[in-house]
Every structure is written in C-alpha cells, then in structure tokens.
Amino acid sequence: MKVSTRHFLRPFGLIGALLALLLLAACGAQAPAAAPTPAADRRLAATPTVTPSGLTFIELEPGIGPHPRPGDVVDVHYRGALADGTEFDNSYLRDDPLQFVLGAGAVIPGWDEGIALMRRGGKAQLIIPPELAYGAQGAGGVIPPNATLTFEVELVDIRRNPPAAPQALDASAYVTTPDGLKYADLETGTGAEARPGATVVVHYTGWLTDGTRFETSLLPTRPLARQKPFEFHLGDGKVIPGWEEGIAGMRAGGLRQLVVPPELAYGEQGAGEGKIPPGATLIFEIELLEVK
C-alpha cells in the first residue's frame, strides 16, 4: 500500500443530525424523535446495578462472548431520553450504529463505563448522572444543564482491534520468494482467491522491525470516524511490490504476515513523512476481507 501517512463525544455532538449529540458538543440540535421505545418497559424486570461512579446499569438482554476491552472498536445502537421521557436521539431511525474506540475518551464517561459491562448482541439501559454526561453545561441546545440521561443501548459488534505487535513466528514458518519477500499464513481463508486483475478489500497493520507500529486500518482515524478497510486493484501498481506479491494467492477470510524488504517497499527514500525511514524492512499483517 502507499502509506498515507458520531460521540457521545465528550461532550456529545451531532453528526449532521443529532448523532452529533453523540458527537460534538458544539454541534446543533435536531427536533426530538418519536416516543420512547417500548423496550424501556423491560427495565422493570431487570435488576439495576449502581457502580461506584454513580452509573446505573440495567441489563435487558445478556449478549454472548467476552466483554469489550479498552481499545476495542465497538458498534452501538442507542436511544437517548431526558428524565421526562423526551427522546433526543435515536440511531435506529438512521439505521446507523455509532462506532468508536472504547476507553479512548471519544464518548461521555457514562458510555465508556456502561458499554464495557456489556457483551456482543446484548442490550442494556444506562441511567447516566450529569457528572458522567454533560454536567452543568448541557449540550447541543437539547440536553439541559445538569441533566440525567437514559440510554437504551445495543452492543451490535466488537471489531478486531489492531495488535500491538506482529505475531512472533519461527523462521521455518515463512515462505521466501525469489524476490526476497517472506510470508506466513496466520489464518487460511476459504473464500475467493486474490488474483491479479481482481479488486481486493483488506484490513492491515504495519510495523517497523523495531516493533514501532506505523499504520493500521483497524482504528478510526478520528474519534468517531469508522474503521475503513483499504480497497485496491491487484496488479495495477497502486501499492508497494511486496503487497502485490504477498496478497496474490490469499483467499478471502485469510490473515497473512508479510516481511517486506526495502527493495519491495519504499527503498532508500522511505515514506510517510519520516514514519518509514530509508532502507526499512516492513512487517504487515493483512486480513483479506473480500475479493471482487
């Protein structure tokens, strides 16, 4: 590849519409959505848990699997209401769950804490006191000062987060090509094969040999931006030669590690405004999501 180089933000905003109430406190407001969801009635059958910070957490549906961890990218559907029942935002109406990095301060503290208590597919009600939301300032002209907020949230997905370091492999695990590229399959895909002429969609993380991670597609580039897989036409020379050679032959669903010598990467020029120094050998882990 050529290196290129919404929020219950603290405070919420609107992403165009009131999604930014989740997003940026400076954003404007939209008219309240329709009536509160009937799912709120289920809180009567659930046992509230009040955390030391003052968050009230009520599990409505348990979900499955592990809890998300700080640094994970999560997708969350939600409905938000004031204490009087006025619904101020609803991601279901947009069919657009909010995606953010958990624990990175991208959303209000009540969300970072509450979503961490859930599991994939689970639903919960969060009753968030003002000190874990927008405090004495309020937000967006819609959330008044010192407002306690109630959210019904659904943890739609927990996405693969970028590894801190490439997997350590024995030298015998690698195949070395005549050009000097080394590759090893970490997971073998079962889908369509990537061939020259095909369009491929990948997630990737890249490191220098000293362990410095210089780029990844697995983290949003901004607090409420989405993960963005990289898509390109294999064989057109739009990516470094090590990628052209290393991705060819993979099958969709596979995960492959590449060790790319400088002559198949950025050579003596380096790249990325100093992120990749001259003469650098690069390590990539590439997940092939789709072959078109």
Image (spheres, helix red, strand yellow):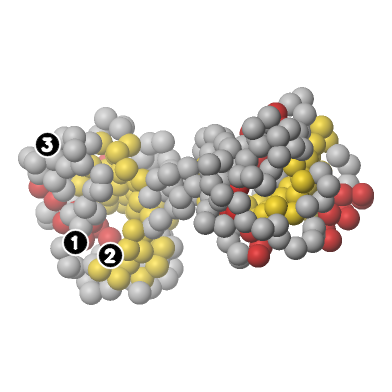
Q: Which residue is rendered at x = 11% and y = 36% of the image?
A: 278
Identify the mark nearer the N-term, 2 or 3: 2
In front here: 30 or 38?
Answer: 30
Q: Secondary structure at mark 1?
A: loop
What residue type is disc 1 on?
Lys
Q: Are marks 3 and 1 in contact (CB under 8 Å)?
A: no
Q: Are marks 2 and 1 in contact (CB under 8 Å)?
A: yes
What residue type is disc 2 on?
Phe
What residue type is disc 3 on?
Pro
Identify the mark nearer the N-term, 3 or 1: 1
Q: Which of the 4 image quadrants contains residue 254?
A: bottom left
Q: Which residue is rendered at x = 79% and y = 61% of the image?
A: 35
User: Residue 253 appears at what percent x and percent y?
Assistant: 43, 63
Identify the mark nearer the N-term, 2 or 1: 2
User: Residue 215 appears at what percent x and percent y?
Assistant: 32, 43
Q: Residues within 10 Å of mark 1 (few under 14, many from 20)?
A: few
In front here: 226 or 194?
Answer: 226
Residue 278 tag number: 3
Q: Which residue is rendered at x = 77% and y = 29% of the image?
A: 54
Q: Quadrant of the N terminus?
A: bottom left
Q: Secondary structure at mark 2?
A: strand
**Residue 24 in the figure: left or right of residue 251:** right
